[in-house]
Image (spheres, grey):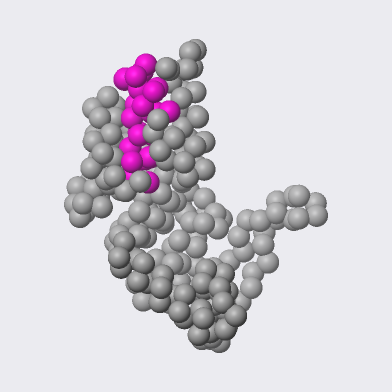
């Protein structure tokens, strides 16, 4: 039975909290209950879309975003969500059209939206396009560490390591831990020569972590016993 006296905004807020906790099924239950009372709530339709997207139910996500856009054709979150979903269907041109419509509507100053779109494009390998949105975000807040670092990652993926390093050759906004006052962070020289050495350390730590996880999972007093347990587990998986 629907919870009495809740507004559509309160349903959306409850679902958003569940979504942030990774409880996508529960978030969907709340959103559907809300839509039963407020079927024309754009925010609830958008919430359903993102919950389905997180569950990788892309067809349902697309439907929800499209329903939201029927109610409000210029809603920036619905446009961004639809674009992300279209990328999953390989419809890159339509996705870019949806993303760029947010620019046409004047949402360049929404830094979080620009970063969201840029990250979605980056994940699907559209690095040049992602960099464009990261740069728009950085233009709005030149000292935003996330926007600047995203540009650096994009430049690195494009093979422009010199440019990638240069994106960090400036002091970023930070906070003095003791005084809590805003200050510029100290600039540290970037140096790619440390990467190969750090890679060896990283490889060793990954090996130790994996070994610890294997020991916890398969147990045993010696390697041979662990191997028997591992082989039995593999056989069980194959039969399953």
Which residue appears farthest toward the right when viewing the image?
Answer: 178
Q: Nearer the viewer, residue 115 or 140?
A: 115
Residue 237 shows in this picture:
yes
Q: Quadrant of the C terminus?
A: bottom left
Q: Quadrant of the N terminus?
A: top left
Q: Is residue 53 above or below residue 154?
A: above
Per the image, is 39 magenta? Answer: yes
Q: Residue at x 74, y 56 (%)?
A: 176
> What x and y, as percent, mark residue 146?
51, 57
Residue 195 shows in this picture:
no
Examine the image and state in which quarter residue 107 appears.
top left
Dominant secondary structure of the magenta stretch? helix
> What x and y, as percent, mark residue 94?
19, 47
Q: Is residue 148 above or below residue 230?
A: above
Which residue appears farthest toward the top when viewing the image?
Answer: 5
Q: Tell whether 111 sits left or right of 187.
A: left
Q: Residue at x 29, y 40 (%)?
A: 61
> What x and y, as percent, mark residue 186?
68, 66
Q: Residue at x 76, y 55 (%)?
A: 177
> What x and y, as percent, mark residue 225?
51, 81
Q: How many marks?
A: 0
Q: Residue at x 50, y 29 (%)?
A: 14
Per the image, is 127 magenta? Answer: no
Q: Tell whether 208 sits left or right of 26.
A: right
Q: Nearer the viewer, residue 213 or 87?
A: 213
The boundaries of the magenta stretch are 30-54
């Amino acid at each position: 039975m629907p919870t009495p006296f809740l507004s559509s905004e309160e349903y959306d807020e409850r679902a958003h909290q569940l979504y942030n906790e990774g409880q996508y099924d529960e978030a969907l239950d709340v959103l559907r209950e809300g839509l039963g009372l407020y079927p024309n709530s754009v925010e609830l339709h958008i919430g359903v879309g993102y919950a389905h997207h997180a569950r990788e139910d892309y067809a349902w996500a697309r439907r929800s975003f499209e329903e939201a856009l029927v109610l409000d054709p210029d809603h920036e979150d619905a446009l961004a969500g639809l674009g992300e979903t279209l990328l999953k269907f390989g419809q890159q041109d339509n996705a870019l059209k949806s993303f760029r419509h947010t620019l046409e509507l004047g949402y360049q100053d929404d830094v979080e939206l620009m970063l969201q779109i840029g990250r979605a494009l980056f994940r699907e390998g559209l690095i040049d396009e992602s960099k464009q949105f990261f740069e728009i975000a950085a233009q709005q807040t030149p000292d935003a560490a996330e926007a600047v670092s995203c540009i650096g990652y994009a430049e690195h993926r494009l093979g422009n390591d010199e440019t990638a390093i240069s994106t960090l050759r400036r002091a970023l906004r930070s906070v003095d831990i003791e005084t809590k006052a805003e200050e510029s962070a100290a600039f540290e020289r970037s140096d790619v020569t440390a990467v190969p050495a750090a890679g060896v350390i990283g490889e060793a730590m990954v090996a130790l972590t994996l070994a610890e996880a294997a020991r916890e999972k398969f147990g045993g007093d010696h390697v041979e016993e662990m191997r028997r347990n591992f082989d039995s587990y593999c056989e069980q998986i194959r039969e399953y």
